[in-house]
Image (cartoon, rainbow, N blue to C red):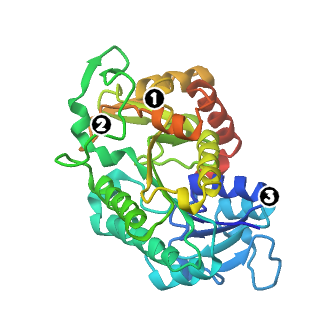
Amino acid sequence: MDTIIITGGLGFIGVNLAQYFASQGYHVICIDNLSRPGPNYVQSLDQLPIRHFYMSDKSENLPDLSAFPFILQYMRKNFPTVEIYLEDIINAAAVKDIITPSNPQMIIHAAGQTSAIDSYYDPISDFSANSVGLINVLEAARHCKCLPIFLYLSTNKVYGTKINEALIRENVDRFELVSPASGFSEIVGVDQTSHTPYGVSKLVGDFYTQEYAYAFGFPAGIFRMSCIYGPQQFGIEGQGWISYLIIQALKHQPITIFGSGKQVRDVLYISDLVNLVEKFFKKLQSTPNSHRKREAYLFNVGGGINNTLSLRELTYLIAQELQEPLHIEYEKSRLGDQKVFISDISKVSRVLLWKPKISPKEGVRQLIDWTRSHLNEFK
């Protein structure tokens, strides 16, 4: 049975990947520090009496998971074969003890600090989680018996605010990207621009993943992702904006929009991302070592030019679905915000024979339905 290790495996993207690959018969190992898997997050791992277990474990040593975060309860009920390590990736020794003897076929690195806003308040913690944590995982993987396929989930924030120099037209409800017409490709420069500390720490990880492919022959890939959304997402004001706006609307709470609300992102539903990760894994798995490039695959990943939303357009979709007006408040723009980011996904579509299937309208509707049915989990 092939083993797949997912760091951040109990977060939004990680848990969706874990559930899918477990359902396909893979031995899935999740490493997570429970920093933000859901509304009832754990303040410290030291609170927990046990840190390593299978979801099927019913021994007396495993406490009642009703006291644990929602995601753990859900995983135990529906995905009992998944193996869980409650550890922090900044602990190099613990990471090596988990990864190296497991000899996984693939590592998906989804762990890290995910809020651009929070990175301004605590750049050191942001760097530790995103840069130091990443190299700890790479080093542990480098000492495996066979080098695993390594997938680093990066961000469009690595491109910084220089993209605001692109030709943009301001319309009533959105900024329109005039040129480049198909979105931003992988050749966009990443230096001499503001990124946010978060964007910088993710870019460091991006570069290290590329370097490990060059220097040590890692079969690696980097997904510079735009907005990913879908079920099991617990959005907060600083991250996960589609989910956050839906939560606020369902709770009849005010929605704060920073800037004009015309900012545009391409959006990708989580099931489309999971499908892409599987295609990447199978492509590299089927490529003989002698035919593999000694460099990382680098892809911009998102919904592309045909799947975009502005903040204003999202509020219209939510109001239409809920059939009630939303309470919206506007604040000044945040530092480092991009007016428009639309991924040019032509490269990843060509190389991996993939394209998104879920439209923004359908995806938002599905996420509203999921969030409504789990609203009691949101404090």
Q: Amino acid under label 3?
A: Asn
Q: Residue furthest front?
A: 290
Q: In the rendered image, which residue does mark 3 sit on?
A: 78
Q: Which mark is residue 327?
A: 1
Place of residue 317 in the rendered image (x, y in percent of width and height, measured from the top left): 54, 23
Asked if residue 169 is positioned above or below residue 376 in the image, the reply reads above
Q: Which mark is residue 338?
A: 2
The residue drawn where x is 60% and y is 62% is 9
Separation of marks 2 and 3 at Cα, in angstroms: 39 Å
C-beta proximity under 8 Å, tags 1 and 3: no
Closer to the chain start, of discs 1 and 3, is: 3
Q: Amino acid under label 1?
A: His
Separation of marks 1 and 3 at Cα, in angstroms: 37 Å
**Which quadrant would residue 1 be assigned to in this image?**
bottom right
Residue 12 in view of the camera: no
Place of residue 154 in the rendered image (x, y in percent of width and height, measured from the top left): 43, 52
Element assignment for label 3: helix
Does residue 156 appear left or right of residue 377 in this picture?
left
Place of residue 86 in the rendered image (x, y in percent of width and height, measured from the top left): 59, 75
Q: Nearer the viewer, mark 1 or mark 2?
A: 2
Closer to the chain start, of discs 1 and 2, is: 1
The residue drawn where x is 56% and y is 62% is 289
Asked if residue 363 is positioned above or below residue 157 in the image, the reply reads above
C-beta proximity under 8 Å, tags 2 and 3: no
Seen from the viewer's position, the closer of residues 46 and 348 is 348
Asked if residue 346 is positioned above or below residue 47 in the image, the reply reads above
Q: Amino acid under label 2?
A: Gln
Q: Nearer the viewer, mark 1 or mark 3?
A: 3
